[in-house]
Image (cartoon, rainbow, N blue to C red):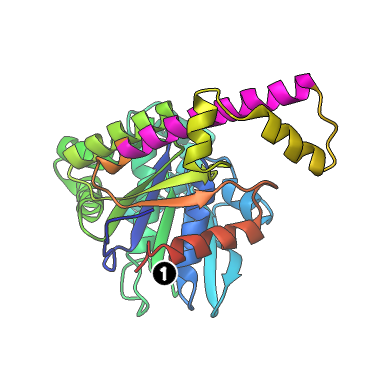
Amino acid sequence: MSTVTTDWSRARLHIVTGKGGTGKTTVAAALAVALATGGRRVLLGEVEGRQGISQTFDVPPLGTEETRVAKTVGGGEIVGLSVDAKAALLEYLQLFYKLGRAGKLLEKFGAIDFATTIAPGVRDVLLIGKIYEAGRRRKDGKHRGASPAAYDAIVLDAPPTGRIGRFLSVNAEVADLARVGPIHSQAGSITTMLESDQTVVHLVTLLEEMPVQETVEAIHELRDKGLHVGAVVVNMLRPPYLDDAALEQARAGRLHKPSISTQLKEAGVVVTPGLLDGLLDEAQDHALRVDLEREQLAILQATDLPIYSLPALADGVDSGEVRELADALIEQGMLR
């Protein structure tokens, strides 16, 4: 479906967002598999606490530790991480302030819960910060706090489109508020990373009015904030069941009843007036649905972003289907 070629060879952090119900977690997982194909090591992170990664790959619920969830063709590896704001804050306090046991006391008295649920923006800062720390590791282990577990790429299953702009810009706001010190320094570093060509934001949508509207609004918001918008992934796409000529007839209610009745009888179907009328009504609804999808696709094409599509899966999504979706992204050239 894409008509635009895009080179994201410098991107190490792929952020995936979309309106709720569009399947952004599935698309994030498929993108991680695609990136890991060929022997690469990819971190797949989530920040909403829904355990979507563990459900997708059929592994036990993820904790705060990075855990391998899948291997890919060519020896690649996907590591899952469910980022928890409370654990991230304790780690942050230990890293920059060496609180040690005092951090546990803060947690005991409720200060950690207060900071992560009440203080404006703190939770998002911590969630992004954890991904930032994983992304800055080098295979030579020279960064402070680094481990051998460096990654070739990171995919983040991010908050939905209605919250993505705020989520990705909160560090810039924090850096303005905290003029000096480690908070200012880290917030500034994270903002620099998010606004660089090492980070790209992909949007997942369905060809329906509300998801497309939210997608377009998010694209404008992200561009206004100086972030790099990547691709639009149209998920759960169903091909038309009829060709254009039949769609035109169905739309106008002019499908030839005798011909359809004959074909049904030849297929061994007992044809009744109610059955035939019901099928014709469904055909008309289908034609109108195709019209709507084409209108929504035209709106997305007007954004001048590359557009890729993933099919609807009749039997739901598991790790096998995720690999099929990853292959579809690769075949369409999303990662070239």
Residue 278 drawn at (x, y percent)? 70, 23
Residue 206 drawn at (x, y percent)? 46, 37
Image-based side of 165 in relation to 88, left or right: left
Q: Residue furthest front?
A: 258
Instruction: Name the residue located 23 percent from the left edge and 36 percent from the top edge.
Output: 220
Q: Is residue 4 magenta?
A: no
Residue 150 sits above or below residue 246 on the image: below
- Callout 1 crowding tier (Cα within 10 Å): few <14, some 14–19, many ≥20: many
Image-based side of 206 in relation to 62, left or right: left
Residue 296 drawn at (x, y percent)? 37, 34
Residues in magenta?
273-298
- Observer-nearest residue: 309 or 292? 292
Image-based side of 268 in relation to 178, left or right: right
Instruction: Name the residue located 27 percent from the left edge and 57 percent from the top edge.
Output: 4
Magenta span: helix, strand or loop, mainly?
helix
**Quarter of the image where one finds residue 197:** bottom left
Q: Is residue 283 magenta?
A: yes
Is the C terminus in the top left, top right, bottom left or bottom right quadrant? bottom left
Please state which amino acid type lies under the numbered disc 1: Tyr
Residue 169 sits above or below residue 118 on the image: below
Instruction: Name the residue located 51 percent from the left edge and 57 percent from the top edge.
Output: 30
Residue 86 visible, this angle: no
- Give the residue number, with chain letter if any, for mark 1: 151
Residue 89 visible, this angle: yes
Residue 334 drawn at (x, y percent)? 37, 61
